[in-house]
């Protein structure tokens, strides 16, 4: 699965829980909260002032490395 800017954070955490530290590093410290689990990658990046393409690269690289 390739993660895109429209992928829901909760879906990512369900399929690739090892990515949680990446999200925590951008300030998403409440990954269990319904609000953060329901955000798209793009929404989370906007809220936390992170460049979406850079985050997608990190998340997808971590998922690919764990296969």
Image: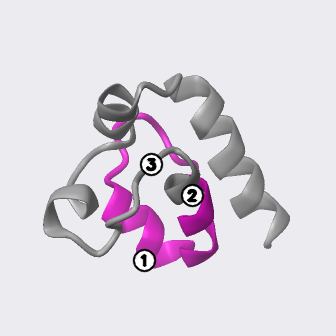
- Location of the N terminus (image quadrant): bottom right
Q: Secondary structure at mark 1?
A: helix
Magenta stretch bounds: 1-22
Q: Secondary structure at mark 3?
A: loop
Circle on res. 1: 2
| Residue 56 vertical placement versus 29 (above, below) | above
| Residue 67 vertical placement versus 62 (above, below) | below
Write down the residue under mark 3: 27
Q: Bin the neighbour count of mark 1 within 10 Å (Cα to Cα): few under 14, some 14-19, many 20 and up.
A: few
Circle nearer the N terminus (1, 3)? 1
Q: Bin the neighbour count of mark 3 within 10 Å (Cα to Cα): few under 14, some 14-19, many 20 and up.
A: some
Q: Is label 2 in contact with label 1 (beta carbons under 8 Å)?
A: no
Circle nearer the N terminus (2, 1)? 2
Spot occupied by residue 66 in the image (x, y as percentages of width and height): 79, 72
- CA gap between label 2 and label 3 equals 24 Å
Q: Is label 2 in contact with label 3 (beta carbons under 8 Å)?
A: no
Asked if residue 34 is among those painted magenta in the image, a careful observer would answer no
Q: Nearer the viewer, mark 1 or mark 3?
A: 3
Asked if residue 21 is among those painted magenta in the image, a careful observer would answer yes
Write down the residue under mark 1: 14
User: What residue sits 42% from the left and 77% below the top?
Assistant: 14
Q: Residue furthest right?
A: 65
């Amino acid at each position: 699965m390739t993660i895109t800017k429209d992928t829901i954070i909760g879906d990512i955490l369900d399929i690739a829980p090892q990515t949680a530290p990446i999200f925590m590093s951008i300030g998403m410290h409440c990954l269990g909260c319904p609000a953060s689990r329901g955000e798209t990658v793009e929404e989370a990046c906007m809220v936390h002032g992170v460049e979406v393409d850079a985050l997608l690269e990190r998340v997808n690289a971590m998922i690919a490395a764990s296969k």
